[in-house]
Image (tube, grey):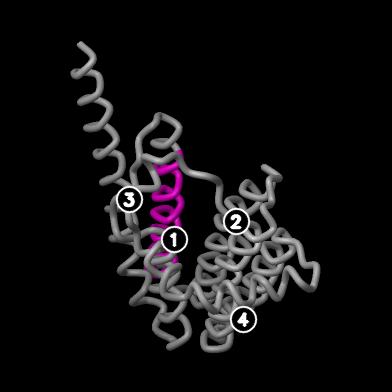
Amino acid sequence: MESEKSPQMSKRKTFTNFLRKVFFIPIDYFARLFMKWGIHPNHLTVFGLIGTIIGAYFIAQGKFTLGGFILLLMGPFDALDGALARLMEEKDPFGPMLDSITDRYIEIFIYGGLIYYYSINENITYVLLSFLALSGSMMVSYSRAKAESLGVDVKVGIFTRVERFLIIVPSIFFSIPHIGLWILAIGSNFTAMRRVLYTQKHLRNNTNGEK
C-alpha cells in the first residue's frame, strides 16, 4: 500500500505510475476479487514477504531459476495490496508503514540470499558487489524519504524499487545474477547520490529565494 502524496508530489510521472496504468485492468480485477473474499491488504503484504523469503532461500542454495520464478510470482502482490487498500478505502496508517518496511526487507532477503551463496562459494568479488547493490538500494529509498521529510519531491533517477526489481529478479531467473548486480551496484548508488545533490540544490534555491 502507499501513503497519500501531496499534490506537488503527485505531478511527477514515474515508471511505476506508467506500469500501474498499463496493468490497471488485471490489478483492479484481482484486487476486487480479494476484496470479495474478505482478504485484508496487510495479508497480501505479508504474503509477498513470506514468498520472497522462500525464493531467497532457493537463491542461497544456488537454485536461481526456481528462486527467481518465485520472486516473479510475488512481484504483483506489491501492487495488489495498494490497489486493494484503495478499493477498501483503508485509512489505517499502519498499512503504509508495514508496506514500506516490508519493501525494504524484501530487498534485504533477495540480496542476502545472493551474499550467502557467493560466500559459501568463496567469491568475494560478488559478495562485495551484492553488498554495494543492497547498500545503493537502501540509500535510494532513504534519500527519497529524507528529502520528502524536508518538503522536496525527489523522484529523480531510474533505479527506483520497481526498476531494481525488474533488473535483479530476471537476472536471477536466467541464472546471470552477476549482471544485475553490476548494473545495480553502480546505478543505484549513482541514483542515491543524484537525489542527494538534487535535494541540496532545491533547498539552496528555496533558501536564496526567501532572502
Q: What residue is at 38 percent from the left and 58 percent from the top? A: 160
Q: Residues within 10 Å of mark 3 (few under 14, many from 20)?
A: few
**Residue 154 location in percent, x, y?**
33, 43
The residue stretch that appears in magenta: 125-145
Q: What residue is at 35 percent from the left and 40 percent from the top? A: 153
Residue situated furthest right in the rendering: 38
Under mark 3, the amino acid is Arg
- Mark 2 vs mark 1, foreground winner is 2
Left or right side of 57 for 116? left
Q: Quadrant of residue 84?
A: bottom right
Left or right side of 152 for 93? right
Tag 2–tag 3 contact (CB < 8 Å): no
Q: Residues within 10 Å of mark 2 (few under 14, many from 20)?
A: many
- Mark 4 vs mark 2, foreground winner is 2
The rendered magenta stretch, by its main secondary structure, is classed as: helix
Under mark 1, the amino acid is Arg
Check residue 161 in the rendering and tell me which mark sits there, or answer none. Answer: 1
Check residue 58 in the rendering and tell me which mark sits there, or answer none. Answer: 4
Tag 4–tag 1 contact (CB < 8 Å): no
Viewer-nearest residue: 34 or 168: 34
**Residue 179 location in percent, x, y?**
33, 77
Sequence-wise, the earlier of marks 4 and 3 is 3
Left or right side of 185 for 135? right
